């Protein structure tokens, strides 16, 4: 990966997202709750003269860089290792705003649903620009119940989630096996959501990397860890890296995933992000036997275009350790055999792990930092980084242009107020 961009292609204006009828209804409800249509505020420099430095080259960093470049900012991305080499490349690529939010239509659900509504046009623009396929597959999803208590919770979900998307159904056992014949006879039924989908995460990251290059973003791989971060009076922020020297910019956006807490070493900002190890396995040649995204209380399965069937994810707290364990993969294989009997005697062909960047409340950190206005955060997306990329990028673009974040700072670092006040900003 070279640090110099391959040409300087003039950035095109951001594509206007065409909403479906159900997405439009969702956005209207979000407006009523005060989550969208942010107001403008002043920004120190015009986009054409403002330098933006993005720390982290995963899917959130690359998405934000592409969006900022399309809006006219001069953008550089510093990645410690290889682009998409951490949680982004390890992800199963699920786009499941309803399955990931079973409780209520809170601000986090609104963000997930908004991002999902953008995805089809966002991916189409990427693919037309780069010629790379992200393998977006509109499979629909099945949330499967194996116990009566699970089935009761699915009924509760159906009541509120069907207000935001058409086609939801609560299926009995016979209807479920008609849609997924390979599912276990022990399955009592499922909640069917036809609108959920998935992508092939490594290919999506590759397309974003190429889109950034074509938009004139400077991409610097193998930059190493940050060894210095300082505010420079009247000149923004200075960043020193172990492998790529020093950089200076008007604004810095931290998109370093599970490593985003490094900021506290240099600035009086406590970024409460910690790693959760997620272990995943795959069965080669088995993906064609599963038609939908399948979720249970203990695991999920996603059939990919290359014929593989991805199963995930067991989670544990192991610091920054990315090794695969027999215990973690073993739990997935046991559940695979229970839910899909044809996998009962089949060993997965491979397993891998990624570090999911989690926050204390499970919501991402997206916003400018009070007291350090040159610094922005776009991190802590936990298990939804792939899903939330389009919406996060749009929020980053708005914030760089001096707009409010549109969600009443629901994703701002200020929500961790006790730590914030101890730092002297409260």
Image (cartoon, rainbow, N blue to C red):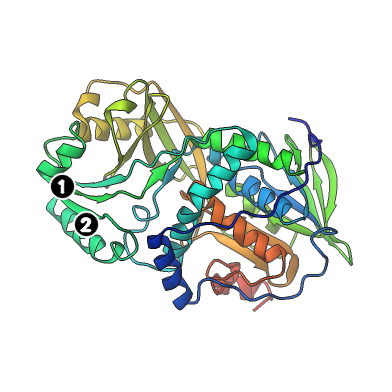
Please tell me in which quadrant of the rendered image residue 110 appears. Answer: bottom left
- Residue 98 x/y as whole percent: 35, 56
- 154 relative position to 20: left or right: left
Rendered position, 195 above or below 133? below
Query: Can see residue 139?
Result: yes
- Residue 91 x/y as whole percent: 48, 39
- 278 relative position to 345: left or right: right
Q: CA distance from mark 1 to mark 2?
A: 9 Å
Tell me which label, 1 or 2, sits earlier in the chain.
2
Label annotation for residue 327 = none
- Residue 337 x/y as whole percent: 22, 30
Please tell me in which quadrant of the rendered image residue 313 appears. Answer: top left
- The reply to whether callout 1 and callout 2 are in contact (CB within 8 Å) is yes
- Residue 251 x/y as whole percent: 77, 59
Residue for point 69% across, 54% down: 13
Find disc 1 in the rendering and name its residue.
Answer: 189
Total marks placed: 2
Please tell me in which quadrant of the rendered image residue 72 appears. Answer: bottom right
Q: Circle 1 sits in a helix, a strand or a loop, which is it?
A: strand
Who is closer to the viewer here, 217 or 223? 217
- 282 relative position to 260: left or right: left
Query: Can see residue 362?
Result: no
- 163 relative position to 154: left or right: right
Who is closer to the viewer here, 206 or 420? 206
Residue for point 19% across, 31% down: 182
Who is closer to the viewer here, 119 or 75? 119
Classify mark 1: residues with Cα within 10 Å, few (<14), some (14-19) or many (20+). many
Find disc 2 in the rendering and name its residue.
Answer: 154
């Amino acid at each position: 990966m070279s640090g110099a961009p391959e040409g300087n292609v003039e950035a095109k204006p951001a594509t206007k997202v065409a909403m479906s009828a159900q997405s439009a209804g969702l956005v209207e409800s979000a407006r009523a709750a005060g989550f969208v249509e942010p107001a403008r505020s002043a920004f120190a420099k015009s986009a054409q003269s403002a330098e933006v430095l993005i720390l982290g080259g995963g899917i959130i960093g690359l998405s934000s860089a592409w969006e900022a470049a399309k809006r006219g900012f001069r953008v550089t991305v510093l990645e410690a290792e290889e682009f998409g080499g951490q949680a982004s490349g390890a992800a199963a690529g699920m786009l499941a705003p309803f399955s990931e939010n079973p409780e209520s239509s809170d601000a986090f659900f609104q963000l997930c649903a908004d991002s999902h509504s953008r995805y089809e046009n966002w991916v189409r623009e990427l693919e037309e620009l780069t010629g790379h396929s992200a393998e977006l597959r509109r499979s629909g999803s099945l949330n499967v119940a194996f116990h009566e208590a699970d089935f009761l919770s699915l009924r509760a979900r159906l009541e509120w989630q069907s207000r935001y998307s058409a086609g939801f159904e609560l299926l009995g056992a016979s209807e479920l096996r008609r849609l997924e014949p390979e599912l276990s006879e022990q399955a009592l039924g499922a909640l069917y959501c036809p609108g959920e989908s998935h992508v092939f995460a490594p290919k999506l990251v590759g397309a974003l990397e190429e889109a950034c290059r074509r938009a004139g973003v400077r991409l610097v791989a193998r930059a190493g860890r940050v060894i210095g971060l300082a505010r420079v009076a009247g000149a923004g922020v200075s960043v020193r890296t172990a492998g790529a020297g020093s950089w200076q910019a008007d604004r810095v956006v931290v998109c370093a995933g599970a490593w985003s807490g490094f900021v506290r070493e240099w600035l009086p900002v406590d970024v409460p992000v910690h790693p959760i190890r997620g272990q995943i396995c795959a069965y080669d040649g088995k993906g064609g036997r599963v038609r939908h995204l399948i979720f249970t209380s203990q695991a999920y399965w996603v059939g990919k275009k290359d014929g593989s069937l991805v199963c995930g994810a067991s989670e544990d707290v192991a610091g920054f350790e990315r090794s695969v364990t027999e215990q973690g993969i073993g739990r997935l294989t046991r559940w695979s055999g229970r839910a899909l009997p044809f996998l009962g005697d089949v060993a997965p062909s491979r397993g891998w792990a990624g570090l999911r960047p989690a926050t204390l409340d499970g919501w991402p950190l997206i916003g400018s930092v009070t007291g350090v206005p040159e610094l922005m955060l776009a991190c802590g997306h936990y298990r939804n980084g792939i899903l939330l990329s389009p919406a996060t990028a749009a929020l980053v673009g708005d914030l760089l242009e001096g707009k409010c974040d549109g969600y009443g700072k629901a994703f701002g670092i200020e929500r961790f107020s006790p730590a914030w006040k101890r730092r002297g900003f409260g």
